[in-house]
Structure formats: structure tokens, C-alpha cells
Amino acid sequence: MENKILVAAPTFEGMKYCHDRFFNRILNLSYKNYDILIVDNSKTEEYFQELKKIPNITAIHDKTTEEKSIFRLISSRNLILEYGIKNNYSHILMLDSDVIPPIDVIEELLQSDKDIVSGIYSSFFNIAGKTKLMPVAWKYLTEEEFIEMKRNYDVNPGLKRFDLRRYLTEEEINSDKLHEVAMPSAGCMLIKRQVFEKVRYGKENPKSFTGDDIHFIEKAKEFGFLPYCNTKVKCEHLIVEKYKKDKNGNFVHSSFSDLI
């Protein structure tokens, strides 16, 4: 029996620059048995009224009273999980509305057959004072990498290997393989029902709260659900369209700290 998939994303009026390309893609995925849910957490209903007019999607206006954007996002993601349970979906493909997945994203991620598995995309990060385009997926250091780091740097004796993460390498990204990761590309993430029946996005501190996606993955690990990244599923991240370059060719953004 074919799996019933919910393709879903939170959004708000500030994401209108992605609107056309995002909806054109998710309305034309190659998998046959899927529905689309969009949860708008804008403070007014203007954008929601636009979303309601799009054929073949279900739009919900999240009437959360949270003021901070991160907490509004958490509310919307949890509405998606609850909708998935109520309507008996086997999986949720949780998307960000600025991430454009390949048309066969569902087939490829289903084939991975993992509780949590993402595609891969890149974003901008501040590294040593410079804005760099890096993969949004991390692995724990291997034992060999950890030993090498301790050999070359002054490391706190209490630090353990699983306290440290690194970006996926170019070789790993180009491998088109399934990788167990510390943190996947959570803006294109297929989640099995057994996970979203138990795990929620939240504000409480599982280890340290640094974002809705990290919180969700850390809580999932507490239940024994391990995250994976399928680097064959390469997505486009439209966040690049919000950036411009300075005179030195570096990408800059007026509110960079809000994006990472």
C-alpha cells in the first residue's frame, strides 16, 4: 500500500519572495499520494487570504499570540504535526517555504526508510567573521578527527567527541549517499508517524535551545530516533535571494543573526 504523505510548511508574509517558485514545485511533485498543508503565522490574515486561493492546498492561519518569530514558528510546526496525526498520514515532509526540493523528493526520502531523513541544502553562516555558504547538516566528529583535534588544540579535558559537530564535507555532499548525522537539513525533512506521534517542537531546554529544528532533533534522539541526511536529495535554498554582496564579494544581510 502506498504511503500517504503530508507535504507541509509554516510560512508568513515575509516569505512572499519565495511564493511562486515554492508553490510551483510542491504542487508538481512526482509522488502521487500526497496532500499539501500551509500554516501561515502572519499577525494579520492578508497573506492567509492569498494562500486560500491556491488550488489543491489546505491553508491554516495560526492564531498564536506569541510575539517572537521563533515561537510563532514553533507553534505552526506543531500544528502541522497535530494535523498529520489527526488525518492519518504515514509521513510528514516538513519543508521551509524558501527550500525548493527536487520533484522526486518523496520517493528518494522514502527509499531511505529512516525515522527522520532530510535532503541537503546550503545557507550562510558567520565563520571567523566572514559570511560563508555552508551545508545545513552536521556530523559528530569521528574518533580519529577528535584525536587529531586534541593533538593540535588546547581542548578542555572534559570535552567528549559527541559534544562537537562539523559541517558535512564537499566529498560527503557529492557522495549521493545516506549519512547518519548529528543534525540534518531540517527544512526538507521526512518524518515517520512514529516520530511525530511522540515528538514536538518546543521552547523547553532539552540541552540548549538554539532553534526549533535543533530542539526537535534533540528531543527525537531522546526517544531513540536517529536523524539521517540523504545527500542525493539536493535542494535549492532561496535565502540567497535575500542577500547582496559587499565590495569585497562577501555576502551580507541586514539581519543576518535572525537567519541562523
Image (spheres, rainbow, N blue to C red):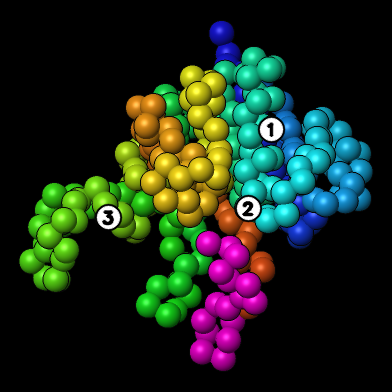
Q: How crowded is mark 3: few (under 14 residues within 10 Å), some or many (20 or more)?
A: some
Q: Name the residue: 68% across, 55% down.
A: 69
Which of marks 2 and 1 precedes in the sequence? 2
Magenta part of the chain:
245-260
x and y percent of residue 200 in the render?
Answer: 55, 33
Q: Name the residue: 58% across, 13% down.
A: 2
Residue bearing mark 3 = 164
Residue 35 falls within the magenta-colored stretch? no
Q: How far apart are marks 3 and 1 (CA)?
A: 32 Å
Q: Which mark is residue 33?
A: none
Q: Distance between the residues labelled 1 and 2?
A: 14 Å
x and y percent of residue 88 in the render?
Answer: 64, 15
The amino acid type found where label 2 is placed reads: Ile
Which of marks 1 and 3 precedes in the sequence? 1
Q: In this orientation, does residue 172 appear? A: no
The amino acid type found where label 1 is placed reads: Leu
Number of the front mark, 3 or 2: 2
Which of marks 2 and 3 precedes in the sequence? 2
Residue bearing mark 1 = 79
In the picture, measured across the screen, residue 41 lies left or right of residue 145, that is right
Q: Quadrant of the N terminus?
A: top right
In the picture, measured across the screen, residue 82 lies left or right of residue 167, that is right
x and y percent of residue 216 in the render?
Answer: 49, 39
Residue bearing mark 2 = 70
Magenta stretch: dominant secondary structure = loop
Image position of 224 with respect to 90: above or below: below
Q: Name the residue: 19% across, 51% down.
A: 160
Q: Distance between the residues labelled 3 and 2?
A: 25 Å
